[in-house]
C-alpha cells in the first residue's frame, strides 16, 4: 500500500472538484476537508469519497457552487437549505453563520437541510471550537438506501447518522474534547475501506441479509445487502433514531422515509453555545481541564498504552500522517483515478498529482 503525501492528495481532490465544476474556493474547501479527514485517520471520509461524489454529481444529486439559501431566520434559530450543494462548503457556511449568531445571542440553533454529503462532522465541531464555542451536531443520512439496523431489527432502516460534540479549549487551540462518530458500530466507509483491502470487518458490526452476524463487508458495500449494527445496543440505536428525528424530521430535511434519488444527502441540527455566557469566570475552563486530566490519568486496562479523550486519536494520526504520508490502498486509488477520468482528466497526470509530482 503506497503512502501518498497530504499535499498530493489535496491537489488530486482539488483537480477532481474543479473538473465537476466547483469554483476555486469551493474546490479548495472540499480538498482541505477530505485531506483533513485522511490525516485524522478517517479514510472513510477522505479522498476515498471522491468516486461517490462524482457518481452523484453525474446523476444531478451534487450541485456545484450553490448559494446557501436562508429559509428562516428567527433570532436564535437559523434554517438553511443547501439545495444539494457541495456539502463541505454548505455546512461550513451554515456553521459560520451560527457562530456569528451564537456570539451575539449566547447560543444558536442551525438547521441545514438537503445538503449533499457534508463529510466528517468533526470538521464543524473544530470550526465552532476554534471560535470558542461548544458544538452539538445531530445529522441524518438520506436519499440513500438504509444501511443500519435499529436495535432488535434484522434489516436496515437508518443511515449511519453521525453525532458530534466539541468543547473548546483556549482560543485558537484544538478542541478540549471532540467526540465525532457514526451511530453505527463502524462507519459505512470503514466497511468500504475493508472491502477494498480484502479484509473482514470486526465481529458485531455487520448482519447478513437474514439478520445473522457476518464479517464479510462485500455484500453490504456492493449491493447494500444486510445491515451495519447500531453502536451500543439499544442506547446507540436510540441516538441514531434521534439523529434522524432532530437532524431531518424536525428541521424539514429529507428523512429516510422520503422518496430517494440515490444521491447522498445530509441534514444537520447544530447547536452552538458560548460557554462564557455561563458566567463561570475561570472556573469553567479550569473544570474542563481538570476533568480531562482526571480521565487521562486513569490506570490503563490490559492492552491499552494510555487513556485518551475523544479527539486524541485523530490528533495523533494527524501528526503521524503529516510526517509519513497517508496510506491509500491500490483499489481506492484506482477508483479515484477512474472517477477523474470519467470527468475528462488525464489518468497519468492525475496519478502523478497524487504522488505529489503534479
Ligand atoms: N457525513 C456523514 O453522513 C457521516 C456518516 C457517518 C460517519 N461520518 C463520519 O465518519 C467519521 C468516522 O466515524 P466513526 O464512528 O468510524 O469514528 P471512530 O469510531 O473512529 O471514533 C469515534 C469517536 O471515538 C473517539 N475514539 C476513538 N478511539 C478512541 C480511544 N481509544 N479513546 C478515546 N476516544 C476514542 C474518536 O476520537 C471519535 O471522537 C466521523 O468523522 C463521522 O463524522 C459521517
Image: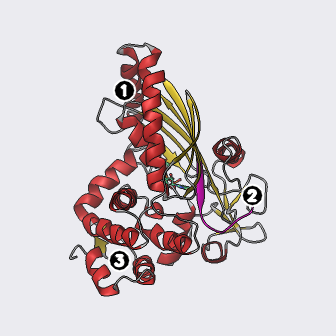
Q: Which residue is mark 3?
A: 1
Q: Is residue 119 above or below residue 356?
A: above
Q: Position of residue 340 (x, y in %)?
A: 41, 79
Q: Is residue 135 above or below residue 275?
A: below
Judge whether residue 307 is colored magenta: no
Q: Examine the residues drawn in magenta and state their main secondary structure.
A: loop
| Between discs 1 and 2, the one toward the N terminus | 2
Q: Which residue is mark 2?
A: 258
Numbered circle sitting on residue 289: 1
Q: Position of residue 91 (x, y in %)?
A: 48, 48
Q: Is residue 247 left or right of residue 102?
A: right
The magenta span reads 257-267
Q: Position of residue 89 (x, y in %)?
A: 44, 53
| Spatial CA span between label 1 and label 3 | 39 Å
Q: Residue furthest left?
A: 357
| Between discs 3 and 2, the one toward the N terminus | 3
* Residue ID at (30%, 36%): 173
Q: Residues within 10 Å of mark 1 (few under 14, many from 20)?
A: some
* Residue ID at (49%, 46%): 180
In this view, the residue in front, 344 or 244, is 344
The C terminus: image quadrant: bottom left
Q: Position of residue 78 (x, y in %)?
A: 56, 36
Q: Residues within 10 Å of mark 3 (few under 14, many from 20)?
A: few
| Spatial CA span between label 1 and label 2 | 44 Å
| Between discs 1 and 3, the one toward the N terminus | 3
> Of helix, strand and loop, which one carries label 2?
loop
> Of helix, strand and loop, which one carries label 3?
loop
Judge whether residue 258 is colored magenta: yes
* Residue ID at (70%, 62%): 146
Quarter of the figure with residue 166: top left
Q: Is residue 247 visible?
A: yes
Amino acid at each position: 500500500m503506497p503512502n501518498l503525501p497530504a499535499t498530493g492528495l489535496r491537489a488530486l481532490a482539488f483537480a477532481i472538484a474543479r473538473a465537476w465544476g466547483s469554483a476555486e474556493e469551493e474546490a479548495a474547501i472540499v480538498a482541505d476537508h477530505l485531506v483533513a479527514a485522511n490525516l485524522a485517520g478517517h479514510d472513510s471520509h477522505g479522498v476515498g469519497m471522491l468516486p461517490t461524489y462524482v457518481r452523484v454529481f453525474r446523476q444531478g444529486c451534487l450541485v456545484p457552487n450553490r448559494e446557501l439559501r436562508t429559509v428562516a431566520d428567527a433570532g436564535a434559530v437559523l434554517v438553511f437549505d443547501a439545495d444539494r450543494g457541495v456539502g463541505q462548503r454548505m455546512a461550513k457556511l451554515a456553521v459560520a453563520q451560527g457562530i456569528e449568531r451564537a456570539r451575539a445571542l449566547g447560543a444558536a440553533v442551525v438547521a441545514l437541510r438537503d445538503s449533499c454529503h457534508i463529510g466528517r462532522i468533526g470538521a464543524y465541531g473544530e470550526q465552532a471550537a476554534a471560535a470558542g464555542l461548544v458544538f452539538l451536531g445531530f445529522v441524518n443520512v438520506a436519499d440513500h438506501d438504509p444501511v443500519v439496523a435499529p436495535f432488535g431489527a434484522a434489516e436496515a432502516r437508518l443511515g449511519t447518522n453521525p453525532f458530534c460534540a466539541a468543547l473548546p479549549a483556549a482560543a485558537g487551540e484544538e478542541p478540549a474534547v471532540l467526540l465525532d462518530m457514526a451511530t453505527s458500530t463502524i462507519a459505512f466507509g470503514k466497511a468500504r475501506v475493508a472491502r477494498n483491502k480484502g479484509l473482514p470487518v470486526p465481529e458485531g458490526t455487520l448482519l447478513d441479509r437474514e439478520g445473522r452476524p457476518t464479517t464479510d463487508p462485500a455484500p453490504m458495500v456492493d449491493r447494500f445487502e444486510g445491515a451495519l449494527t447500531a453502536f451500543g445496543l439499544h442506547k446507540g440505536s436510540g441516538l441514531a433514531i434521534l439523529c434522524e428525528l432532530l437532524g431531518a424530521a424536525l428541521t424539514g430535511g429529507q428523512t429516510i422515509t422520503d422518496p430517494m434519488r440515490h444521491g447522498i444527502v445530509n441534514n444537520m441540527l447544530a447547536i452552538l453555545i458560548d460557554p462564557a455566557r455561563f458566567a463561570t469566570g475561570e472556573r469553567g475552563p479550569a473544570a474542563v481541564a481538570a476533568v480531562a486530566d482526571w480521565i487521562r490519568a486513569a490506570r490503563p486496562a490490559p492492552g491499552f498504552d494510555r487513556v485518551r479523550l475523544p479527539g486524541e486519536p485523530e490528533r495523533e494520526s494527524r501528526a503521524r500522517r503529516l510526517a509519513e504520508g497517508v496510506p491509500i490502498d491500490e483499489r481506492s486509488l484506482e477508483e479515484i483515478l477512474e472517477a477523474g477520468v470519467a470527468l475528462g482528466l488525464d489518468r497519468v497526470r492525475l496519478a502523478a498529482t497524487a504522488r505529489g509530482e503534479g
